[in-house]
Amino acid sequence: MMIRRCHRDPSELLYLGREYPKGGDYFRDRLRAAFARNKAVEDPEQIKALIARGEYVARELEALYYLRKYRAMKKRYYED
């Protein structure tokens, strides 16, 4: 059975995590631990769940960036 490959590779997740609120080093260590912990998984359903979780993390990181960008723009134009 062929499993769809996640379109986000570990390096892209690492790139997204460089500006993580707790720091890029914290995110990198957590990312590395997650991949190491799940390297022996062979069950296709479990692999799909792990890929979905990685996609979720990536979307959440992107949402954090968009929120930060929005707040910066709002602060620039609407001084309170």
Image (cartoon, rainbow, N blue to C red):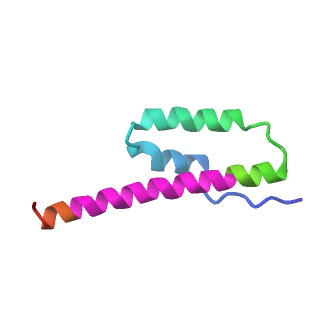
Q: Which quadrant of the structure image shows residue 65?
A: bottom left
Looking at the figure, which quarter contains the N terminus?
bottom right
- State the image coordinates of residue 5 (x, y, percent, origin top left): 72, 58
Range of magenta residues:
51-73
Which residue lies at the image location 46% right of the left edge and 33% below the top edge? 26
- In the rendered structure, the answer to whether residue 42 lies left or right of residue 24 reads right
Q: Is residue 79 magenta?
A: no
Check the image and report above or below for 8 versus 10.
Answer: below
- In the rendered structure, the answer to whether residue 12 lies left or right of residue 23 reads right
Check the image and report above or below for 28 versus 8.
Answer: above
Q: Which quadrant of the structure image shows residue 76?
A: bottom left
- State the image coordinates of residue 68 (x, y, percent, origin top left): 31, 56
Which residue is the extreme one toward the bottom?
A: 77
Which residue is the extreme one toward the left?
A: 79
- In the rendered structure, the answer to whether residue 42 lies left or right of residue 8 reads right
Looking at the figure, which quarter contains the C terminus?
bottom left
- In the rendered structure, the answer to whether residue 45 lies left or right of residue 33 reads right
- State the image coordinates of residue 55 (x, y, percent, origin top left): 60, 56
Which residue lies at the image location 55% right of the left edge and 35% below the top edge? 30
Q: Is residue 70 magenta?
A: yes
- State the image coordinates of residue 36 (x, y, percent, origin top left): 68, 33
Which residue lies at the image location 13% right of the left edge and 66% below the top edge? 78
Magenta-highlighted stretch: main secondary structure? helix
